Amino acid sequence: MNREREQRTAIHLEDVWVRYEQRVVLEAIHLDVARKEIVSIVGPNGSGKTTLLHTLLGLKSPFRGTIQIFGQNRLSRSFSVSMGFLPQQNAANNHFPVSVFDVVAFSIYGRKNLPVRLTAEERQRIERALLRVEMQDWMHAHYGSLSGGQKQRVLIARAMALQPEILILDEPATGLDTVSQDRFYALLRQLRDDDDLTILLVSHDIGAVSGVVDRIACLNRRIHFHGKPTDCIPSEALQKVFGENVQFVYHSHHCQTCEKTKC
């Protein structure tokens, strides 16, 4: 990758192959994500989306290919890019007595030696992260008492407390209603613009993210399409990713129908 391209590229994958035991789950992955871009990896369950995220995070190693993040080799021991991760929502015990502040602090606790004590700077970093997602007023609230959308904001704050250059999210809108989804995606765009973040998120719903992200990558073992949501995605690519009889309709806020109906 030449120097000019490297300067504008946050994530570069070239011919990446990943397997679990003897089964190949990702093959010949080629993907470039520009700096300050929001890109969604879309595909059905079992298509390798989460595996791709885990490979970028260093939780899974490819058996072939090159991964560079901000020009650094992801597999190198000297890799130093800060990355924030929001995993899929799990069935955590909402009655566990933990505050919103503590949930965000967990990201820092994991990087400290016992006994764990937060410095004044680390406490300020946690408070700033909660302020960024507009959850500072719930700092001492019980995490389990929050709504789904509020919990996702807190988990974003947990990732932001690490001051990441890249934010990676796995199905972040699962379980959120339409209004909460819209607010959540608006928050991602704001963080991208204000904090110079590069954001990569996984979704199985291509329609839900089409009006939010800069680019879409359709994945089913291989990447069959990578481009703008407004591009005409070839029907052959959609069939390879989602199966037969799939249609994708993109609604632009600038179309005449939307102007008349205010949809």
Image (spheres, grey):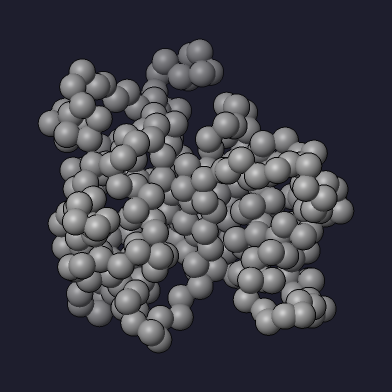
Q: Is residue 89 above or below residue 66?
A: above
126 on left or right of 52: right
Q: Using the image, determine if residue 143 lies above or below residue 165.
A: above
**Residue 40 visible within the image:** yes
Left or right, 144 with reference to 66 = right
Give residue 182's position: percent from left, percent from top: 57, 34
Q: Is residue 10 left or right of residue 166?
A: left
- Classify 31 as above or below 93: below
Assign the N terminus to one quadrant of the image: bottom left
Percent x, y of residue 62: 25, 66
Q: Position of residue 249 (x, y in %)?
A: 32, 23
In the image, farthest residue toward the top = 261
Q: How many marks?
A: 0
Residue 28 location, quadrant: bottom left
**With respect to residue 223, does 13 lie above or below?**
below
**Residue drawn where x is 23% and y is 50% of the image:** 25
Residue occupying the point 63% across, 71% down: 110
Q: Nearer the viewer, residue 187 or 105?
A: 105
- Residue 53 % position (x, y): 38, 56
